[in-house]
Image (cartoon, rainbow, N blue to C red):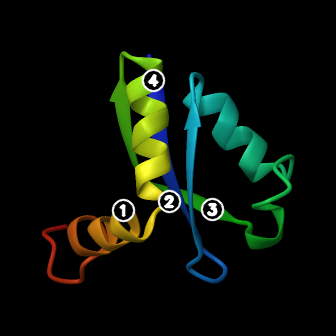
Amino acid sequence: MYYVYIIKSEKDGWRYVGFTSDLKERLKDHKNGKVASTKNHRPFKLASFIAVENKEIALNLERYLKTGSGIAWMNKRLFSSSSPA
């Protein structure tokens, strides 16, 4: 199983999209400052994740969520203030 995940900084609201095959371990890496691109935005909370069986599909989803269209989709569908809690 592969995971595309979104973490959100509790410090400044910054979001990060990533891909992993071990979600628990990868979140530990972020929490412990082992990921250079996220360590200055700690602490984090897991905002969302999607589990996918196919690695290529998961990587394509991660790439999409990092594009302008993917960010707009996330903002509208996952982080909209009018979304159900």
Q: Position of residue 60 (x, y in %)?
A: 43, 38
Q: Position of residue 17 (x, y in %)?
A: 54, 54
Crowding around mark 1 (Cα neighbors within 10 Å: few <14, some 14 to 19, many 20+) is: some
Cα separation, mark 1 vs mark 3, equals: 21 Å
What residue would you read off at disc 1?
70
**Residue 84 vertical placement versus 2 (above, below):** below
Q: Position of residue 28 (x, y in %)?
A: 72, 40
Cα separation, mark 2 vs mark 3, equals: 18 Å
Residue type at tag 3: Phe
What residue would you read off at disc 3?
44
19 horizontally vs 84: left or right: right
Q: Residue at x 50, y 59 (%)?
A: 66
Q: Residue at x 49, y 34 (%)?
A: 59
What residue would you read off at disc 2?
66
Residue type at tag 2: Lys
Q: Secondary structure at mark 4?
A: helix
Crowding around mark 4 (Cα neighbors within 10 Å: few <14, some 14 to 19, many 20+) is: few
What residue would you read off at disc 4?
56
* Mark toward the start of the polypeptide (3 vs 4): 3
